[in-house]
Amino acid sequence: MKFNRRETIILAAAASAVTLSGISASQAAEGDMIDQAALMAPAGGLTDKVEGNADAPVTVIEYASPTCPHCASFHNTVYEPFKEAYVETGKVKFIVRPFARNALDAAIFLLAEAAGEENYHNVIATYFKTQNEWGMSDKPRDAIFTVAQQLGFTEESFSAALTNQEVFAGIEAQREQALDEFGLTGTPTFYVNGKTLSGGKTLEQLAAEIDPLVPADFVAPAAADAMAPAADAMAPAADAMAPAADAMAPAN
């Protein structure tokens, strides 16, 4: 099955916009610092889907493309140990943002947004894992829909997601911001507390950037909660402090 007319209009616009936008003249080189406040103000009205401790000392933002093999390699091989070492320990707040290089990228980000915040990362991860199945298909809509069905989409919800012009405009706006304001030159691109890291990275490469930014006395939120004495344990029970009413009252 081919993309229907409404889907084609949206996705053709994505392909056209990528062709016209090119790469910004103000390209950021490896290691360049980007203003963190600007990075944390994404364009387009789409809400960041944050993984990890909201108050983490390190923020890692990745601009990713579902059709990018280097992005898939990172998410399929590096992300889980990275998540275990840094996201789950509260050291890193991790954000994936859309960078649609083509119509297929746009389609998958539209589906991820439609799936909602709780399922956003699972949709992206699933398409990275199945990239070889849909990315090389001569019937891309069918291949993308087959994966979408496994994620709970119906034909109706699938088509509705791909024709959501408001979300599509937000995806476009984030791509343009990445190019024009942040000097992005390709995917994946990571920003570690504002520092530009271009291309696929190993866990060791990310650790070399992140570890110096984590305070020596940092305590993970869960550990801090475990160390704090419970209020009930600190306060003597009211019943233990007050004499029982029956013991105080004279027997009839």
Image: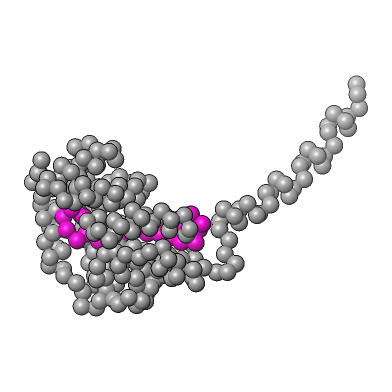
Q: Residue drawn 11% across and 55% down?
A: 12
Question: At 45% from the left edge and 70% from the top edge, which residue is drawn?
Answer: 208
Residue 69: which quarter of the image? bottom left
Residue at position x 29%, y 56% in the image: 72
Compared with residue 63, is residue 150 higher up or lower down, i.e. above or below? Answer: above
Task: Identify which residue is drawn at 14% across, 63% down.
Answer: 17
**Residue 237 left/right relative to 141:** right
Query: Where is 128 relative to 145, above or below?
Result: below
Q: Is residue 67 left or right of residue 124?
A: left
Determine if the magenta segment contains residue 178. Answer: no
- The answer to whether residue 226 is left or right of residue 162 is right
Q: Position of residue 196 (x, y in %)?
A: 34, 72
Q: Nearer the viewer, residue 35 or 86?
A: 86
Task: Give the quarter of the figure containing the C terminus.
Answer: top right
Q: Do we see residue 53 in this rendering?
A: no
Is 98 included in the stretch rendered in magenta?
A: yes
Count every numbered label the image shows and give the total.
Answer: 0
Q: Which residues are magenta?
A: 87-106
Q: Tell me residue 186's x, y (percent).
A: 24, 67
x and y, in percent, of residue 5 in the image: 8, 46
From the viewer's perspective, is residue 187 above or below residue 136?
below
Decide if residue 229 is in sight here. Answer: yes
Q: Quadrant of the N terminus?
A: top left
- The color scheme shown is one colour
Residue farthest to the top, as pictured: 252
Q: Position of residue 211 (x, y in %)?
A: 49, 68
Asked if residue 229 lies left or right of residue 96, the reply is right
Q: Nearer the viewer, residue 149 or 229?
A: 149
